[in-house]
Amino acid sequence: MKFLKNNQALVALAAMYILYVLIDVIWWKKGVATDPQNLRNILSQNSYTGIIAVGMTLVIIGGGIDLSVGSLMGLLGVLSILALNKPADDPTKTIAAIVVGVGAGALIGFANGVIITWGKIAPFVATLAGLVGFRSLALALTDARSLTSSSKDLFPGLAQGGIPIPGAVDAAGRPLLAHWPIFIFIAIAAVSSWILNRSVYGRRLIAVGANETAAIYSGIRSNQIRVISYTILGICTGIAAVLQGSRLTGADPASLGQIVELDAIAAVVIGGTSLNGGKGQIWSTVVGVLILGLISNILVISSINPNWQGCVKGVIILLAVLIQRGQKSTS
Amino acid sequence: MKSRNLLKFGLIAAAALMVFGCGSGEASSSASSSTPTTAPTTEGKKLKIGVSIPSADHGWTGGVKYWAEQEMKKHPEIEWVYQTADNPAKQNESLDAMLAQKIDGLVILAHASEPLTPKAKELHDAGVFIINVDRGFTEPVADIFLAGDNKAFGRISAEFIAKQLGGKGNVLILEGVACNVNTDRVEGAKEIWAKNPGIKVLDSQQADWNQQKAFEKMQTMLVKHKEVNAIWAADDDMALGAEKALKEAGRDKNIFILGGAGMKDIVKRVMDGDPMFPGDVTYPPSMIAQGIELAVKTMTGKTKAELKAWKPTNEVVKIELIEKANAKDFYFPDSIY
């Protein structure tokens, strides 16, 4: 029982999934809720937002927020494909695409952090400027054209390849792949979770987020700690951008990463991390990502009129948060 | 303290420079390119024409921006006031700004009809000559209306699917952002589905003109629907996303996709006889260039009074079916879209 009380987000996810299976078994009779391909799709589709949400969790625990990640993802995707398409056709250019995408992400994340801490501009405002600016930069760099990857196999393989799921095949009889981004998402979540809970940096980040003044008095360099969290988020955004570019074999400057920032922040909050900072867990954000992904999947499968889907999604998000709150008050 | 204020001021100034520098850069570059050559008006000064279009938020609007900029460059004798807008409210504001700059004419591709009609009327009443492209106003305020026909888009593409399937088969639908353009296309297609009882529309989802969303929505729909014969997508960006989902699920045999708007990548594949894309329908973003050209031709050399007495004209941009045989007529390898 104590386990359940401490893991409210997981309870909400389990409740939703059980409901999904029941509706499917009793009503639709299509077997979609337990179809391995459908479950794989949910994981695969949401791993990109998930990677960003993990970085976002660290920033929010440190008392910040970053609204620029969606636009930044668009910009980094564009930069990465530009790097990919510049040199002649050889394997090193895929490496160039990764280095440029992730490296520029780290640099811009660092810059965001510096503007917020030493520049003393509220994170909401500083990253709002990024939200507007990065998208415009992506459009300007490409003249609003969408870019196509010139690498035919290697670069697309980063996100389209994967490990075969035992016993599962697709319609053409090929083994069903669990795509690489799923594992990258899990790996990044595991490493970040370790950083947050086991490393000195993690403890300092929590202290800064909980009470920055107290943290400074106890000798923590709070600016440094916060800049690092934005840099990690920039790296995460770069990884997600490169992978999404690989999956779509190109980057569209206008739509790549659009409103990802909202999905990422929503996942963090649904997972139970406090927007006030100082409190939260990586794995609960992972559960938050899965809850959002499951909702989207159910909405498409249930054929609810698309114009109403947003309403239904909003209500379910509120319910998921309420389930958590109810659990908390009884503990 | 002082140095920090200085830093803040510097940052704000830099940011302002970035934002406004970028914004006005385009307008001023098009304006400055217009300094040479002679003034063509009868009233002794340069014609000032406003061009107002939606921002490039997906492939087609990117095409509109491209064609508009190309066409404006061809006419340095005109002083262009050029603005793109994210949404109808912003477009309203940019029209206000254009009115304040005393434009003589306006070429507009409206975000949506209803919210922009009152403002267009205001400009028209103030003596601005209006060329409206694609989406019509709800009142006859345009002097020249170059209409796109989204209903025909839906009808023609659905008819093609019905014919290809021999009047019998299962179809999945991908819609764009909920708006008049999308509704007209979907309604046009529905007229045809109603006439073909053998065609079953299994499911319909919104993918916001977006390749990634189309990919993901189609992945999910394919799990639910095992027997699908054709996909109707409300534009070519989404058609490409649907194709990725089919390939990824190993369902890319005995199925075809019909998108629309004549994206060059799709037209090329129709031309090459790709079984996934047996056809496409046109909805050329270059219609904005036609509108701009019409504005220049009509307004040059006319007095205000002559323009005021102009009888409104209507023209419809023809929507055409692209098939393997005629695809080469619609393939522009250098175009952005």
Image (cartoon, coloured by chain):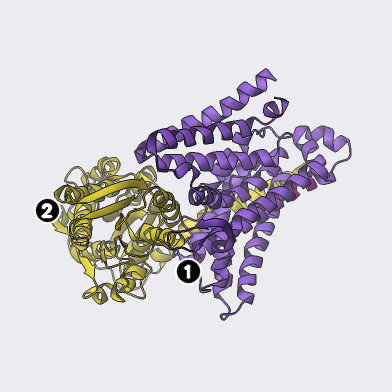
* In-image side of B138 versus A281 (left or right): left
Residue B239 visible within the image: yes
Q: Residue at x 36, y 49 (%)?
A: B225
Considering depth in this image, is A1 or A246 the residue closer to the camera? A1
**Chain ID at mark 2:** B
- Amino acid on which disc 2 is placed: Ala
**Magenta region, residue range:** A224-231
Letter of the chain in yellow: B
Query: What's the mark number on residue A148?
Result: 1
- Amino acid on which disc 1 is placed: Thr
**Residue found at the far front of this picture:** A167
Please give the residue where the numbered disc 2 appears in the rendered image.
B309
> Is-magenta flag for residue A214?
no
Measured from the top left, where is residue A132 in percent x and y?
Answer: 53, 50
* Quarter of image, res A4: top right
Whole-Å distance between the Cαs marked 2 and 1? 50 Å
> Is-magenta flag for residue A228?
yes
Measured from the top left, where is residue A192 in percent x and y?
Answer: 73, 48
